[in-house]
Amino acid sequence: MNVFVCIKQVPATNKVQVDEKTGVLKRGGVAGKLNPYDLYALETALRLREAHGGRVTVGTMGPPQAQAVVREAYMMGADDGYVFSDRRLGGADVLATGYTLSQAIRSVGDFDLILCGRQTTDGDTAQVGPAIAEYLGIPHAAWVSKLTLSGDGVDAEQQLQDVIETVHMSFPCLVTVEQDICMPRLPSLKTAREIGDRPVHIIGLDAFPDTDESHYGLAGSATQVERIFPPENDIEHEVWNEGNNAERLMTMLKKRKFI
Amino acid sequence: MAKIAVLERKCTGCGLCQAGCPFGAIDMANGRPEMNAACRVCGICVKACPQQALVRLETRAASVDKSRWRDILVFAEVSGGRLHPVCLELIGKARELAAPLGFSVRAVLVGHNTGRHAEELRHYGVSEIAVYDDPELGYFRADAWADCVADYIRAIRPSVVLVGATSLGRSLAPRLSTRFRTGLTADCTKLELRENSDLVQIRPAFGGNIMAQIVTANTRPQFATVRYKVMNPPARAEAASGEIVVRKLPEAVRESRARCVSVTPVPPKRSISDAEILVVGGRGLQKEADLAMIRELAALLGGDWAVSRPLVEKGWTTNDRQIGLSGRTVRPKLIITCGVSGAIQFASCMKDSEYIVAINSDRGAPIFDVAHVAVVDDLYQVVPKLIEKLKEAQS
């Protein structure tokens, strides 16, 4: 079975600072890490490979530095990895990111199963997985907490509001997984030694089936960020400094009839 | 026509582009580069930018004829036999947005045995309720459900489509927006409609203390998801209005490669969104065992407990306890946060609570910006004593 796992490098901290005078984001110098939710998708892929054979390929759209997260995936056991890197891919929204990844996946090979984490910690949209599936014209299941191989495809348990719905999808298909699907393994030094300096493939837009750059990046995006601004806060509040705050809280709780 | 675009979230305002421009075509306005009329789109600045924040745009998407896309469509989610209350909130918001432009609000319902839900929707002021009802739709398959909603979108050409940011909605919406090659903005906290029918979408963004204002200016329809408890539900009208239109099942539904294996109802879990009093633990908690303190305080107040994202990332508890963009939105009568710093992802999902008490030893913590009572103190000083006093009061 051939599995592709979508991964992403995200800022290691979500403490992004804003310059109060200019309103500009200070992003420089923030280290990157592998999006924590992607670990569950990768672990799911590795377990399927261990049980049923096949290959696990990972890929990410990002700057060349995103190689670091592909190497991390290697250290967990991924067989092959790609960074889809091209200036013309910059500024992509969900529509353009989904398109880029669908084109990139097509250019890398034929996959039975594509796995994604539930969302990234920087974009927080949880939308790119289903968008890739739509572009590839394949079925998908999201918020999946259990995935088993079955016949010509997989059975996926989707966690919805008041029901768990298990759907069977024949290959090829796409699944986004929840955190409770499995416990990801740690990157292993042994694996790191075995893989040595296995290369990370870096490919750009020219390797994709569709090389029309107006379909990618900012040009291929449907949404535009018009402005960014600090949230307004107009709340009047009391400030209590150190002192007998437990007592004061009791008084407040009684006064407001919470107790 | 080509031009140079600035990716605002990457730009650090370093000014290297301005220094490198041979035509003096870059002005720094508010710390960001702006190309003036001297720009020849040579691309030198694109190469000079260390952040890759400048992009050469070769083409601009031709704008769609906006006057041909009218009305607002609300996706009415039925899952587990229940009409999700978020769709009433969306209808309320949609009616507010639609009125000044003379748009009407429609709803689309997908599922099986949905009759009573369609009937119920007639009490909320929508002009039409489109129903796709078939045994094939008795369970959720994103591709098949997208076929149905897409069929209705093609028929009525709505300007805006609103979808609840539930698990089901967030699986369905990106398939639909992609099918129409248009924009989708997740988890909007504020929506406005311009005279030219552009939907102004505001959401917290970039993992920091920042809001983004987003538009889908060149394509239609404009898709947005909104979470439960963000908008206000409208009052239910006694009289029923609005027409129920039963639509034919699109052929594509039968071609889906997904099929149902089993449906297991899960007893509706008490969600933190439903609690009237919430006690929340944050990164200020030193070890997992200290969560017991949070639980105890919540129990003594007859409320429920929740956490901020770092504690879920540490694996101390599960996502359904998390307040924030990647968790739940809450609006309780009282919320007490203990050691929560209050990043926008968190604050935007609880700031509408009626009374907010924040305990944090860091005077500069952003949580204090949204709190009614800012307790600048060590939670380990305050919480155990408060628990003691509550116990005394109850015995």
Image: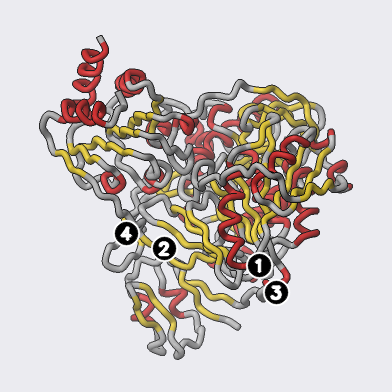
- Find the distance from the CA under tag 3 to the CA under tag 4: 38 Å
What amino acid type is highlighted by mark number 4? Val
Residue identified by numbered label 3: B65
What amino acid type is highlighted by mark number 1? Thr
Quarter-of-image position of residue B211: bottom left
Is residue A144 found left or right of B347 in the rendered image?
Answer: right
Residue A77 is situated, as x and y percent measured from the top left of the image, at 56, 34
Q: Earlier in the sequence, mark 2 or mark 4?
A: 4
Density class for disc 1 (Cα within 10 Å; few <14, some 14-19, many ≥20) is many
Are the two marked residues, 1 and 4, in contact with CB atoms closer than 8 angstroms?
no
Asked if residue A30 shows in the view, the reply is yes
- Find the distance from the CA under tag 2 to the CA under tag 4: 10 Å
Pointer 3 and pointer 2 on the same chain: no
> Is residue A147 placed above or below B393 in the rendered structure?
below
Residue identified by numbered label 4: A18
Label 1: element kind: loop
For disc 3, the chain is: B
Quarter-of-image position of residue B254: top right
> Is residue B54 placed above or below A97 in the rendered structure?
below
Camera-side mark, 1 or 3: 3
Question: Which residue is found at the position 67% from the left and 76% from the top?
Answer: B62
Camera-side mark, 1 or 4: 1
Residue identified by numbered label 2: A228
- Find the distance from the CA under tag 3 to the CA under tag 2: 28 Å
Question: What quarter of the picture does the C terminus of chain B occupy?
Answer: top left
What amino acid type is highlighted by mark number 2? Ile
Residue B344 is situated, as x and y percent measured from the top left of the image, at 38, 48
